[in-house]
Amino acid sequence: MRLSWEWLTPRRRPATARSVLAGEASAEAARKTSQAPEEALEAGATEVTPAGEPAEPEFPVAGDERAAAFFDLDNTVMQGASLFHFGRGLYKRKFFERRELTRFAWQQAYFRIAGTEDAGHIQDVRESALSIVKGHRVAELMSIGEEIYDEYLAGRIWSGTRALAQAHLDAGQRVWLVTAAPVETATIIARRLGLTGALGTVAESVGGVYTGRLVGEPLHGPAKAEAVRALAAAEELDLDRCAAYSDSHNDIPMLSLVGHPYAINPDTKLRKHAREHDWRLRDYRTGRKAVKIGIPAAAGVGALAGGTAAAVAIHRRRS
């Protein structure tokens, strides 16, 4: 096993029992909703890679059934935070009040300005999402999620990363999203992109209704690595022959599990780590600073301007 923890700072710790639980629950949910390899390939074939994008990376090896690819979602496969845009769609359908949308917007502003995630930010996002879906039926959210994908997410997919995923599908390999976003949201995105399935945060439901609690913890950091490890064991994959793709240093545990790690649109810490360890890098952004501070408009929320200005001021003071 190629996992190495030397990158951890003294304040960080390896996976906890809750991380393991979250990873195993996510792997189980992913296997239940995944497409067969031939179905994923057929669905993915409808996507067209724009001219000028890389056709495929130096590998994958065609026909290697024990190899697969794992892609982080936010800022790796799509620009920005998927959960924020999902929140926009729910606000449009009157699931919650304007002040809660403003909170989602602030969280997206932080994500964009900082260019990374931290435990406190993930906790805030988790609490917001759980309070919104509590009491709603899983089937209802899945149906709405399909509409939200078309409205807000489809146009935000990085075509370069999409081409990398398609290369794995063309080689007959399975491709999974791995994200802290809810597994239902991640599964919709994976299906619409023609991927095999998704590993995501599992919210508890009883009788098809959300309870407002999680199974374990958000699929973030070490929990992602645990999910990939559990899925690989269940699917009899050889992690040394697998690939993983992410933009964030928080995903170094997941990237370190596989034989072919890629840094995609990397943050500063991941870029440094990738160069030190001779990992492949891809960057599909243009005007990186504009990407960091740009905030997608949330219709009807005038408070965004003030919140964004405050966020920029905080960022500048910290710089």
Image (cartoon, rainbow, N blue to C red):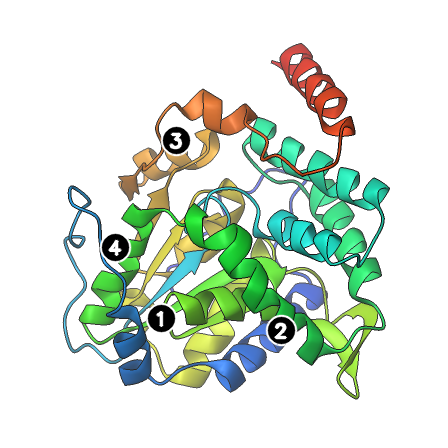
Disc nearer the start of the sequence (1/4):
4
- Image quadrant in which the C terminus is located: top right
Give the mark toward the camera: 1 or 3. Answer: 1
Residue 125 x %, y %: 73, 49
**The residue tagged with tag 3: helix, strand or loop?**
helix
Q: For the residues labelled 1 and 3, say whether their Cβ atoms are less than 8 Å apart.
A: no
Q: CA distance from mark 1 to mark 3?
A: 32 Å
- Residue corresponding to mark 4: 163
Q: Residue at x 49, y 44 (%)?
A: 6
Q: CA distance from mark 2 to mark 4?
A: 26 Å
Q: CA distance from mark 3 to mark 2?
A: 38 Å
Q: CA distance from mark 1 to mark 4?
A: 12 Å
Instruction: Answer few, some or many: residues within 10 Å of disc 1's Cα (few below 14, many 20 plus, some between 14 and 19).
Output: many
- Residue corresponding to mark 3: 272
Figure quadrant of residue 29: bottom right
Instruction: Answer few, some or many: residues within 10 Å of disc 4's Cα (few below 14, many 20 plus, some between 14 and 19).
Output: many
